[in-house]
Image (cartoon, helix red, strand yellow):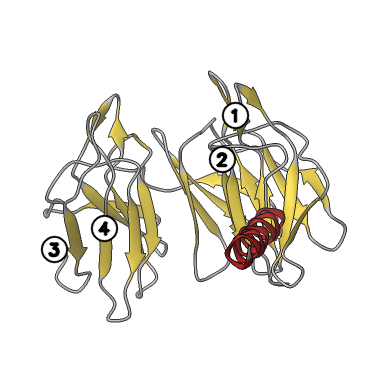
Amino acid sequence: MKRLCLAFVLFGSLGTATAQAQSNVLTLNPERTGHAATLLNSGQVLITGGVNEGTTLNSALLYDPVSRTLSPTGSMISARANHTSTLLPDGRVLITGGDQGSLSLNSVEIYDPATGRFTLTRTMTLARNRHTATLLRDGRVLLVGGKSADLFDPVTQVFTVTTGPPKANRTSHAALLLPNGSVLVTGGYVGSVAVNSAETFDPATQTFTLLAATMLVSRANHAVTLLPNGTMLVTGGLSGNSPHDEVDIFDPAQGTF
């Protein structure tokens, strides 16, 4: 009888612990993919848009790391997925492009954490999805994707085409600010084919330079991370139906992978 009682106590404790663990699980409402998430100056995280079971969303959520809760904030003007979300120097967030299914967007919104509201601003010079947005040292934002690239000025809220176009018409690529202030753009799809090429953007001349060096493999939907020694770690991605295990290290001083 004592063993039986102990078993009931143990199972009861496990059941309580499981119920408590389940109650602590955070869930996105509604669930989504193809969304964007940006860390705000307050420490909260802004989660925008995405797709839910074929429906493109305009809703946005805030994650509070102190209370460990997700709560709704103002909704975007346009539903969008596969867009970019960039924290501006003044604490607002720039939301650009994306898509609504097969429709690519050129619309742009700015989120103000102080009011919790999104407002429309000037449009990009062309519609883009699965593109990149990189904050430059001077506060402007470089948008790369498609046959041209844009620079967004947060003061005038105007998009202008860069002096020189990118060397490749890329989507699903990666872009990262280098220690010297230039931007590294790697891989992605050109048409329907993944590429192993890379190029750099110089904000001073507003021109792109194709690197002679290429990555070990062609890759899209990959990640690039700045390491403490100034080199870049390029990981994953795919060029067909299977993901890659190959890893590249880019040395900006040598311009090599």
Q: State the CA–CA distance, disc 2 to disc 3.
A: 30 Å
- Quarter location, residue 154: bottom right
- Which of disc 3 and disc 2 is earlier in sequence? 2
Element under disc 3: loop
The residue at which mark 4 appears reads as 234
Looking at the image, which residue is at 25% across and 29% down? 241
The residue at which mark 3 appears reads as 256
Above or below, comparing residue 134 to residue 164 in the picture: below
Disc 2 marks which amino acid? His
Q: State the CA–CA distance, disc 1 to disc 4.
A: 28 Å
Q: State the CA–CA distance, disc 3 to disc 4.
A: 12 Å
Q: State the CA–CA distance, disc 3 to disc 1.
A: 35 Å
Disc 4 marks which amino acid? Val
Looking at the image, which residue is at 60% across and 29% down? 105
Q: Nearer the viewer, residue 47 or 160?
A: 47
Q: State the CA–CA distance, disc 2 to disc 1.
A: 9 Å
Q: Residues within 10 Å of mark 4 (few under 14, many from 20)?
A: many
- Which of disc 1 and disc 2 is earlier in sequence? 2
Looking at the image, which residue is at 79% across and 61% down? 113
Disc 1 marks which amino acid? Leu
Element under disc 4: strand
Element under disc 1: loop
Question: x and y percent of residue 191 in the render?
Answer: 30, 25
Q: Nearer the viewer, residue 60 or 5?
A: 5
